[in-house]
Each structure stands twice: as structure tokens, then as C-alpha cells.
Amino acid sequence: MKLAVVGATGKAGSRIVKEALDRGHEVTGISRHPENALAHPRLKALKGDAEDPAALAGLLKGHDAVISSLRFVGTDAQKLIAAVKQSGVKRYLVVGGAGSLEVAPGKALFDTPGFPDVAKPESGKGREFLDAIRKEDGLDWSFLSPSTVFAPGERSGKFRLGGDGLLTAADGKSHISMEDYAIALLDEVETPRHIRRRFTVGY
């Protein structure tokens, strides 16, 4: 497949790019600093900015799917969604956040008393992005939320998928490595099972 990854040089984005390349896909990696992209014959590193929808749409055209791996703070959901729609690419996958996941029916992790203040700006914007994309019926979107702790780690290939509820492992922790997250996301790219749905991945 031909995949476009927006935010390709970030922590999560770079691991998504690597997973896609390891599976044999052709990848266009779009970022503000393409010089930081890894060198690979099937990776085309391009400079792009989500704040310029018309220019970004031009970079996205002709791909089978677009993957967005951007921080929500500083990202305008409407501009990014508009760029994807303008490009003509129907399949759109978003690296989401954990804050909007439910810890009880109708109660988001974001709204729990112990939720850290430092994470609130990013999580709040992530929830706004999810609300915005849920109103879109012109895209075959998927929004994959990681577990609470989302950091570089092992590529084990062993994880669970869930829906809107936060996943917690037997040890009481809610976590997923960026490497295993990338597996789950690329699985969804190759075999779509969550069209116009949010889902989550964790141990």
C-alpha cells in the first residue's frame, strides 16, 4: 500500500513508519523536519505543515491511507480533517490519546480526580479532535487510543484491543509500547475492523 504518515519523525510516528516499511509498504513521511527521517528506499520524506490544509492535501493525494501522528495541542482538527478530505483519500487513521477513554460508563479518564494537570491540555484537545471526527461521514476514519502509559519499549506483538473503555493489565497498569501500538495500527490499515470507530490497545 501507499501510506502517508503526518508527524512521521515524532516518537510514535517514527515507529509507525518503521512498522509500515518493515511490512513492505511505500511510505510518504510528512513532517516539519524531514531531515530527521530515517533513510529507506521506500520512504519519501517531505516537509509539510498541518496548518496549511491546501498544501498538505497536495502531499496526501494518491495514497491508500493517511495516518495522523501529531500532538493535539497546536493542531487544528478542522484544518487537518479538511486537508484529508480535500486530498481525496478516504481512509484516515488517527493516533489518539488515553484521556478520552472511559473508566466507567460515561466517565472519561480525563474527568477522574487523579488525572494529572500537566496532561490536561493535550488530553482535552484530543477529546475535541475525537468529537470532531465523529461528526465526519465522508471519511473512513479510525481513532486508536493508546493506554495511559504510552512510551518507547519492546515490540512483543502481544496485546489486547478494546473499544471506548480503558484497558488495564493484570498488574493494575494501563500501558502499551509505541512499538506494539504501531503493530495494532498497521493491522487496522491492512485489515480494517474499526471503520468510523474509536478503539484502544493495551496489555
Image: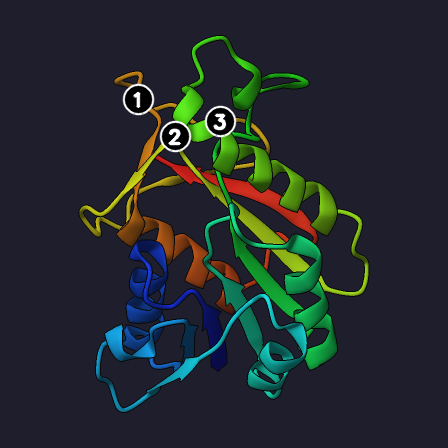
What is the distance, in whole Å, between disc 1 and disc 3 at their CAs? 11 Å
- Label 1 element class: loop
Of 153 and 161, the residue lying toward us: 153
- Label 2 element class: loop
When asked about the image quadrant of residue 38, the answer is bottom left
Three-letter code, disc 3: Leu
Residue drawn at 30 percent across, 49 percent down: 178
Percent across and percent down for residue 10 are 33, 60
Q: Please give the residue where the numbered disc 1 appears in the rendered image.
A: 173
Q: Please give the residue where the numbered disc 3 appears in the rendered image.
A: 166
Single out the residue that lies furthest toward the top.
113
Above-or-below relation of 190 to 89: above
Above-or-below relation of 121 to 141: above
Residues at badges 3 and 2 in contact (C-beta under 8 Å)?
A: yes
Residue drawn at 32 percent across, 88 percent down: 42
Q: Please give the residue where the numbered disc 2 appears in the rendered image.
A: 148
What is the distance, in whole Å, between disc 2 and disc 1 at their CAs? 8 Å
N-terminal label among 2 and 1: 2
Above-or-below relation of 30 to 201: below
Three-letter code, disc 2: Thr
Residue drawn at 63 percent across, 55 percent down: 76
Residues at badges 2 and 1 in contact (C-beta under 8 Å)?
A: yes
